[in-house]
Image (cartoon, rainbow, N blue to C red):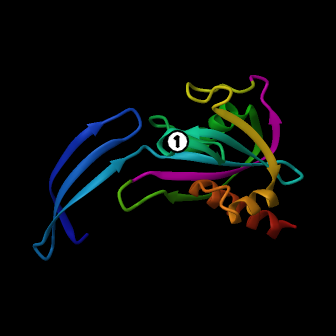
């Protein structure tokens, strides 16, 4: 690395994120301040039926004050493995489970100021969970709605700026490419 941390200060510790301000010095002697959002990361699920329909959730996202159509996803719990998180989130948000899982990739969401890493999985051989959905507060009826749609339609929605969530765009496009290469 071409810098050293002179001072690290935690400004805020929250339920989901922490804000840290680092004072750093480059090898050149120049100094700078870096504001970093620390996030535990999460998992994202591209759930694909045999006919290539996929599951999305349409949910209200407070930071942007609107409903967003996106893949099921959620935050990693402490010491939780990404695959377990993906399996849990698919079941909780959609009421579905899957027999086959494949990791597609892992992405940094906004590496300019945040360390969040999302693990994107494809789930296949879907079946309804005997326990159904287990929605959290803020995901109740009306705030989170499960949507089943053909993968090709989801791609069209990306092209029309109707699916604008970055993790969902990455998962849908990678999944479509992988599924097409198998046919």
- The residue shown at (34%, 34%) is 14
Magenta-drawn stretch, dominant element (helix, strand or loop): strand
Depth check, front residue: 119 or 143:
143
- The residue shown at (27%, 38%) is 12
Q: Is residue 146 above or below residue 170?
A: above
Q: Residue furthest top?
A: 131
- The residue shown at (58%, 26%) is 136
* Numbered-mark total: 1
Identify the image quadrant of the C terminus.
Answer: bottom right
Q: Residue furthest left?
A: 29
Residue receiving disc 1: 65
Q: Residue furthest bottom?
A: 28
The residue range painted magenta reads 115-131
Q: Callout 1: few (<14), some (14-19), or many (20+) C-alpha neighbours within 10 Å?
A: few
- The residue shown at (20%, 54%) is 22
Please check the rendered image and state whether residue 129 is part of the magenta-colored stretch, yes or no. Answer: yes
């Amino acid at each position: 690395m071409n810098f050293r941390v002179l001072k690290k200060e935690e400004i805020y510790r929250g339920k989901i994120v922490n804000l840290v301000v680092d004072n750093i010095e480059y090898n050149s002697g120049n100094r700078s301040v870096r504001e970093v959002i620390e996030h535990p990361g999460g998992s994202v699920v591209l759930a694909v039926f045999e006919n290539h329909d996929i599951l999305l959730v349409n949910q209200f996202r407070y930071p942007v004050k609107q409903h967003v159509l996106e893949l099921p996803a959620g935050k990693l719990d402490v010491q939780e493995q990404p695959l377990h998180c993906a399996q849990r989130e698919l079941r909780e948000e959609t009421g579905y489970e899957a027999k086959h899982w494949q990791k597609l990739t892992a992405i940094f969401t906004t590496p300019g100021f945040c360390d969040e890493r999302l693990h994107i999985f494809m789930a296949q051989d879907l079946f309804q969970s005997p326990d159904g959905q287990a929605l959290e507060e803020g995901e109740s009826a009306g705030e989170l709605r499960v949507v089943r749609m053909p993968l090709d339609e989801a791609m069209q929605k990306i092209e029309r700026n109707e699916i604008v969530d970055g993790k969902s765009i990455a998962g849908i496009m990678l999944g479509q490419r992988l599924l097409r290469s198998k046919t």
